[in-house]
């Protein structure tokens, strides 16, 4: 693989030189591309990945792209020029990295899509993530159980805040939850006063907290200002949940709703403890990082790579062999066991 890359480098010397990066380095280097440092979870993912890869004996080039697709594209090109043997990429936008992926394919560099599927490219070797559809079903099932929808008459008022339309996972989160909740919507036990239910209507670009907050404020002022209760707010992740919670604090006087989330971010976990958020799907990034490190080693050593799903994740060009980790949920009743006893957080971090 190194020989092929060096030959390709010689043929494309002018292009690589224009990137102002050194010739391919000796040894096995892993390039890790994360979307942003603005969200806690990506900092944790990057740190966990770098730590475990270094402990496994690899050189690591870790970059964060400030949620700018063009920056991420250039960073990945530089990783290739710096001699990465494997690339691990958590894309800002799943279909924005085609040029870099083509370059990786030309140099025969395997690519692992990390937690977000890389779309519309045949250069994606593997996908490592949590079961994203299951994340949604966990959220939906929590709502069903919390409202006792099997037995309660209702109706209960539901609002929905989904994720980034540029993130392929967001559709899985949304669909998993809606597949659980739709029978209760059809039966009239769950009603949506805003009428906003389709993914395009409820999506939150770049998962931004302030965008989720602004939309929630509009919904509350338009449909709940007369004292109507919102009974449950389905939020696909913690950054959007935080926006909804801020809007509720400033613009809502009814009974506090059930609120879902994902990632167990520190502020949201504090809100769970304080009763301001009901649950958050816990995706232990240490588990995912360990699996990816294992996959990197298998790739470099020419071994069979662990996958447990070869049917679900079609990126528009091919079905990408995937390894899916299983998510669970944390709430005020079990967060100590899941988050503190496991060493994910310390008690001081949640004060």
Image (cartoon, grey):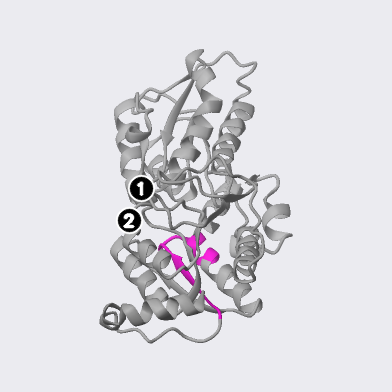
| Image position, residue 35 (x, y; %) | 41, 62
Q: Could you tell me how many numbered marks the image carries? A: 2
Task: Depth check: give the residue in front, 129 or 19.
Answer: 19
* Neighbourhood count class around disc 2 (C-alpha, 10 Å): few under 14, some 14–19, many 20 upward: some
Q: Which residue is mark 2?
A: 96
Residue situated in front as seen by the camera: 121 or 48: 121
Residue 43 covered by magenta stretch: yes
Instruction: Classify 164 as above or below 61.
Output: above
List x then y, in percent, for residue 285: 60, 59
Residue 234 in the image: above or below residue 300:
above
Please give the name of the residue rendered at 37% of the width and 49% of the height, measured from the top-left corner.
Answer: 120
The span picked out in magenta is: 28-45
- The quadrant in which the C terminus is found is bottom right
Which residue is disc 1 drawn over?
166
Where is residue 263 drawn, in percent x and y? 55, 52
For the question of whether residue 253 can be seen, the reply is: no
Left or right: where 255 falls relative to 272: left
Q: Secondary structure under badge 1?
A: loop
Residue shown at 56%/73% (left/top)? Answer: 50
Tell me: residue 233, above or below residue 195: below
Mark 2 lies on a secondary structure that is loop
Q: Residue at x 60, y 64 (%)?
A: 349
Q: In whole angstroms, how far apart are the C-alphas of marks 2 and 1?
A: 9 Å
């Amino acid at each position: 693989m190194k020989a092929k890359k060096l030959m390709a480098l010689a043929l494309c010397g002018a292009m690589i030189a224009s990137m102002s990066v050194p010739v391919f380095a000796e040894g096995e280097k892993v390039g890790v591309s994360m979307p942003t440092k603005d969200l806690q979870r990506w900092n944790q993912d990057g740190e966990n990945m770098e730590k475990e890869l270094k402990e496994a004996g690899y050189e690591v080039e870790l970059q964060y792209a400030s949620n700018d697709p063009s920056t991420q594209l250039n960073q990945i090109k530089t990783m290739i020029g710096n001699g990465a043997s494997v690339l691990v990429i958590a894309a800002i936008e799943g279909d924005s990295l085609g040029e870099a992926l083509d370059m990786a394919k030309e140099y025969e560099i395997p690519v692992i899509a990390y937690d977000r599927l890389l779309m519309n490219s045949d250069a994606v070797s593997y996908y490592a993530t949590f079961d994203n559809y299951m994340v949604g079903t966990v959220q939906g099932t929590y709502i069903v159980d919390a409202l006792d929808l099997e037995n309660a008459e209702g109706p209960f008022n539901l609002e929905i805040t989904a994720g980034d339309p540029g993130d392929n996972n967001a559709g899985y989160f949304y669909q998993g939850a809606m597949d659980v909740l739709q029978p209760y919507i059809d039966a009239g036990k769950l009603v949506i006063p805003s009428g906003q239910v389709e993914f395009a209507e409820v999506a939150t670009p770049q998962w931004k907290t302030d965008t989720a907050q602004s939309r929630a404020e509009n919904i509350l002022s338009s449909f709940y200002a007369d004292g109507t209760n919102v009974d449950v707010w389905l939020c696909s992740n913690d950054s959007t949940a935080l926006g909804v919670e801020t809007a509720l604090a400033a613009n809502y006087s009814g009974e506090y709703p059930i609120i879902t989330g994902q990632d167990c971010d520190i502020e949201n976990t504090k809100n769970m403890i304080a009763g301001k958020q009901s649950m958050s799907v816990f995706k232990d990034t240490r588990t995912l990082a360990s699996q990816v490190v294992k996959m990197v080693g298998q790739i470099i050593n020419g071994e069979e790579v662990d996958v447990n799903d070869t049917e679900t994740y079609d990126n528009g060009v091919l079905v990408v062999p995937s390894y899916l980790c299983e998510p669970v949920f944390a709430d005020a009743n079990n967060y100590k066991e899941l988050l503190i006893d496991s060493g994910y957080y310390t008690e001081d971090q949640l004060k």
